[in-house]
Image: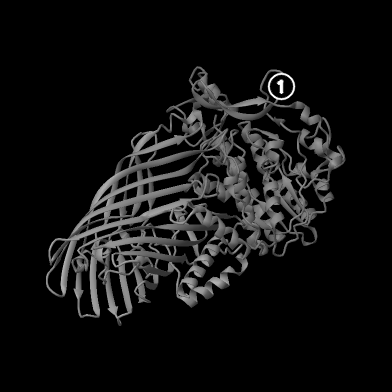
């Protein structure tokens, strides 16, 4: 998307030849640069600003300009420009492997490159009041294990997307305090395929479940400029419950069973979990800014994923999830190298919300350390270009999904490349 | 400089992404076992009998063949089976007046109902004599009882078992046991005893059950040869017949009361009692109006309480003899009785729910007695777990989803 296909092909070809040395080299380079990063746990996607992606996705306690629409609406009124537009996206290259318990079976997923994006626009109305609109993709999941892999009766592939549109106002109370709130209009769609254990001449049956829906939520925050150097922020994002009434279920089964598996509609619900984030920023000197965030994610709202089919012949499907709340820690640093260039580093640790015994190949979660780096180029006083590079390597996780009696060891890694443009005047 | 470093990291990261993620590969091991020559002895369950018949198509996915395939990942040797000619199969049920035997059953829609329909068997298969191509590693013979494995009568043309006559090394002279030893086994499996009760149970009776003391004696004779000099092996016990749809399915389809023949009654008939089992072939008769006072269901189509009692008593005694043999000779014991009991209430394996329900349960094939290839794969994993535990081995489990269940039209 953001990197030309030819360049990628070139990188891959080049890298193949030096693959064996890569690990040690990479670790050394990470240590040298303190750089690297990854995609978030569960199906949360913490990639809402190419700038912040470079510093561990901190920012709740920072004055970010238009990007505060997402990170902390309370900080928006401290925006320095009168008008600011910001937009960008990330290309996620992810790999998952599964090594089956007790077996020599090893399989690697073939995930497509996924491309979350964001757009922000904010305008100052007066000294105290700033309004804006954000379009973000804070949740999503994209995994392709394939039609014939061993766990096909649990999942073959899934593509889950959510787009949040958020009109927001922020009001500065005085020199130090500011508040803000936004209303979230959420759109979500899902497409998943799984095999069914009814075989015909052409192999296993299959069901495709798809649908889209809309929902509402809110985002609010408080920002406190404690001193010239120290800033603090607290933000709250509500859980957005995505309820779907008219999902479509399409069955491919042997002809003699078609009466038992008619194409039908289904209802299902899935929460996009809310979170409470506390953040701090410390402007150490003119060049160095440090930031830290603690984000408490309300995953426990995801208790089950149930598909209730309209047709009586099709049995409803109840799937326990019982996710647990998590707390993500983030730190980041930004260094002003010159008027032209800013460099960033960051680290985040994103624990998995998925309890032991409920680990599925649909979301093979694990604790994820995440190292990030990034830079900003400022060709003019109005325009800046952000880029970030992150590497995520999940801790190896052995376990499985008790209700399906499916166990193994999952490994996940991902490389993320972000780019963003900001225009302020 | 910074730019250079960042681009270098970028390049390296892309390279790393391209590299495979490190995976701890499964380290297969045969533990204390030498699996270079594995020999299987047994009946139709070990021969590869599926859908009412034996043929090459299911022989290649027989329980011992699956085991040998997994053994091969832990140092196991070649595994030779007396394969039938391509595309042919033969069962044991006469499908017409001339006594033509069936081939594989197929699921077809008949009168808008899914029905297992027998194909015509290939009688000429029995003339395909392959005894000189041995020794064979799979010595299982459909229809074999424990005593049959010990006698050369079993390989004698005319009086013997046609499946065995076909591949015995010396028809009329060799027994299953003597031919099994020709392969100089380093490891064996024995799963025998089903037919010692099933032969009469399938015929709706209990008079032909092998007495438990005799059964134990046959097992001991087999052990003396197979487990000689501490040769390791695996032995499986016998499931209860209630776990098989052949005996359990019709009961779920019956009207409230049906009449059955019973010569012990004055009227020569009575009502089927609860707990009594109507056999699968009775479905056709019931459809044709049997089961009424005018046309009571003939005695060979159901098992009375007394007959069921005799059968389950025998199975319990056999299983005791099998457990004793396993303990005495330090063999791995597979509790197939236990597994089939679990199957009755449903068993989840690798994302699917299996049961002992006819056809839709997926473990038992269209004849209601034998397993599907997927069922045999599930059974193979029971065997592998028992072997791994007994001999400190790490033989990889088989992927059951690679094998077919029942195939729908």
Could you tell me residue A266's position as x and y percent?
Answer: 34, 39
On screen, residue A143 above or below B11: above
Q: Position of residue A195 (x, y in %)?
A: 49, 42
Assign a secondary structure to mark 1.
loop
User: In the image shown, does A229 or B349 lie closer to the viewer?
Assistant: A229
Out of B321 and A85, give the one closest to the viewer: A85
In the displayed orientation, state which residue is furthest to the bottom: A285
In this picture, is B98 found above or below A280?
A: above
- Quarter where residue B84 is shown: top right
Horizontally, is B194 left or right of A180 in the view?
A: right
The residue singled out by tag 1 in the image is: B99
Instruction: Estimate how packed mark 1 is, as few (under 14), some (14 to 19) or many (20 or more) residues with alpha carbons within 10 Å.
Output: few
Vertical position of residue B50 compared to residue A118: above or below: above
User: Along the horizontal axis of the image, is B36 left or right of B202?
Assistant: right
Question: At which x and y percent is residue B373?
Answer: 62, 41
Q: Residue furthest front?
A: A380
Q: Residue visible at 71% across and 60% down?
A: B328
Q: Could you say where residue A18 lies in the image, as x and y percent from the top left?
A: 62, 66
Residue B267 showing in the rendered view: no
Tell me, yes or no, if residue A242 can be seen here: yes
Task: Give the residue at x 75% y 45%.
Answer: B138
Q: Is residue A117 left or right of residue B136?
A: left
Q: Quadrant of the C terminus of chain A?
A: bottom left
Left or right of B287 on screen, residue B73: right
Which color scheme is applied?
Answer: one colour
Q: Residue at x 30, y 67 (%)?
A: A296
Q: Chain of mark 1?
A: B
Look at the picture and state if B131 lies above or below B229.
above
* Figure label count: 1
């Amino acid at each position: 998307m953001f990197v030309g296909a030819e360049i990628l092909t070139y990188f891959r070809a080049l890298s193949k030849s030096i693959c064996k040395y890569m690990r040690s080299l990479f670790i050394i380079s990470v240590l040298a640069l303190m750089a690297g990063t990854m995609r978030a746990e569960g199906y949360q996607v913490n990639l809402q600003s190419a700038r912040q992606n470079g510093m561990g996705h901190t920012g709740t306690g920072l004055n970010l300009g238009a990007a505060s629409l997402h990170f902390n609406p309370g900080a928006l009124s401290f925006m320095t420009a009168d008008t600011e537009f910001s937009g960008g996206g990330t290309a996620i290259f992810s790999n998952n492997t599964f090594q089956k318990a007790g077996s020599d079976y090893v399989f690697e997923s073939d995930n497509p490159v996924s491309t979350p994006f964001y757009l922000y626009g904010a305008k100052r109305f007066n000294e105290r009041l700033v309004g804006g609109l954000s379009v973000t993709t804070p949740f999503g999941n994209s995994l392709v294990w394939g039609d014939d892999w061993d766990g096909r009766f649990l999942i073959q592939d899934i593509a889950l997307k959510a787009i949040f549109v958020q009109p927001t106002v922020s009001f500065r109370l005085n020199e130090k305090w500011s508040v803000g709130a936004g209303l979230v209009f959420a759109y979500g769609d899902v497409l998943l395929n799984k095999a069914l254990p009814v075989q015909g001449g052409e192999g296993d049956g299959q069901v495709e479940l798809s649908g889209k829906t809309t929902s509402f939520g809110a985002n609010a925050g408080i920002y406190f400029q404690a001193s010239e150097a120290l800033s603090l922020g607290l933000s709250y994002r509500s859980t957005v419950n995505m309820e779907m009434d008219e999902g479509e279920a399409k069955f491919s089964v042997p002809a003699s069973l078609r009466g038992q598996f008619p194409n039908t509609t289904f209802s299902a619900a899935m929460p996009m979990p809310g979170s409470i984030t506390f953040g701090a920023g410390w402007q150490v000197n003119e060049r160095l800014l440090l930031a830290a965030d603690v984000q408490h994610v309300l995953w426990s709202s995801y208790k089950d994923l149930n598909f209730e089919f309209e047709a009586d012949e099709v049995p409803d499907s109840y799937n326990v999830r019982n996710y647990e709340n998590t707390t993500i820690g983030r730190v980041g640093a930004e260094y002003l190298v010159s008027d032209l260039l800013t460099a960033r580093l960051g680290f985040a640790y994103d624990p998995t919300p998925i309890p032991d015994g409920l680990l599925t190949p649909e979301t093979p979660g694990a604790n994820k350390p995440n190292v990030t780096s990034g830079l900003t180029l400022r060709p003019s006083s109005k325009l800046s270009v952000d880029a970030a590079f992150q590497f995520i390597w999940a801790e190896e996780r052995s376990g499985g999904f008790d209700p399906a009696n499916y166990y193994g060891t999952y490994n996940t890694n991902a490389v993320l490349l972000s780019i963003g443009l900001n225009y302020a005047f | 400089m910074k730019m250079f470093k960042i681009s270098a990291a970028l390049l390296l990261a892309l390279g790393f992404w391209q590299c495979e993620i490190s995976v701890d590969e499964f380290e297969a091991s045969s533990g204390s076992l030498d699996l270079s020559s594995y020999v299987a002895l047994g009946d139709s369950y070990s021969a590869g009998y599926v859908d009412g018949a034996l043929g090459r198509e299911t022989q290649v996915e027989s329980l011992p063949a699956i085991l040998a395939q997994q053994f091969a990942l832990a140092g196991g040797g070649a595994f030779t089976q007396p394969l039938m000619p391509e595309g042919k199969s033969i069962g044991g049920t006469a499908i017409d007046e001339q006594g033509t035997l069936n081939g594989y059953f197929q699921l077809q829609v008949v009168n808008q109902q899914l029905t297992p329909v027998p194909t015509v068997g290939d009688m000429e298969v029995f003339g395909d004599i392959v005894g000189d191509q041995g020794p064979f590693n799979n010595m299982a013979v459909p229809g074999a009882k424990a005593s049959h494995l010990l006698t050369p009568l079993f390989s004698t043309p005319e009086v013997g078992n046609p499946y065995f006559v076909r591949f015995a090394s010396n028809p009329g002279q060799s027994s299953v046991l003597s031919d099994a030893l020709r392969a100089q086994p380093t490891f064996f499996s024995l799963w025998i005893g089903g037919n010692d009760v099933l032969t009469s149970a399938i015929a709706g009776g209990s008079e032909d059950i092998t007495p438990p003391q005799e059964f134990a004696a046959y097992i001991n004779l087999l052990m003396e040869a197979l487990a000689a000099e501490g040769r390791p092996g695996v032995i499986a016990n016998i499931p209860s017949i209630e776990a098989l749809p052949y005996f359990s399915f019709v009961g779920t389809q019956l009207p409230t009361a049906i009449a059955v023949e019973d010569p012990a009654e004055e009227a020569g008939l009575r009502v089927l009692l609860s707990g009594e089992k109507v056999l699968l072939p009775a479905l056709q008769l019931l459809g044709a109006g049997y089961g009424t006072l005018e046309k009571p269901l003939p005695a060979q189509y159901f098992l009375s309480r007394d007959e069921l009692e005799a059968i389950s008593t025998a199975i319990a005694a056999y299983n005791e003899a099998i457990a004793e043999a396993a303990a005495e000779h330090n063999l791995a014991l597979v509790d197939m009785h236990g597994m089939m009991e679990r199957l009755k209430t449903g068993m989840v394996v690798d994302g699917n729910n299996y049961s002992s329900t006819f056809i839709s349960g997926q473990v038992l094939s269209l004849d209601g007695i034998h397993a599907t290839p997927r069922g045999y794969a599930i059974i193979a994993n029971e065997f592998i777990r028992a072997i791994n535990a007994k001999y400190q081995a790490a033989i990889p489990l088989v992927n059951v989803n690679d094998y077919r269940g029942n195939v729908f039209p």
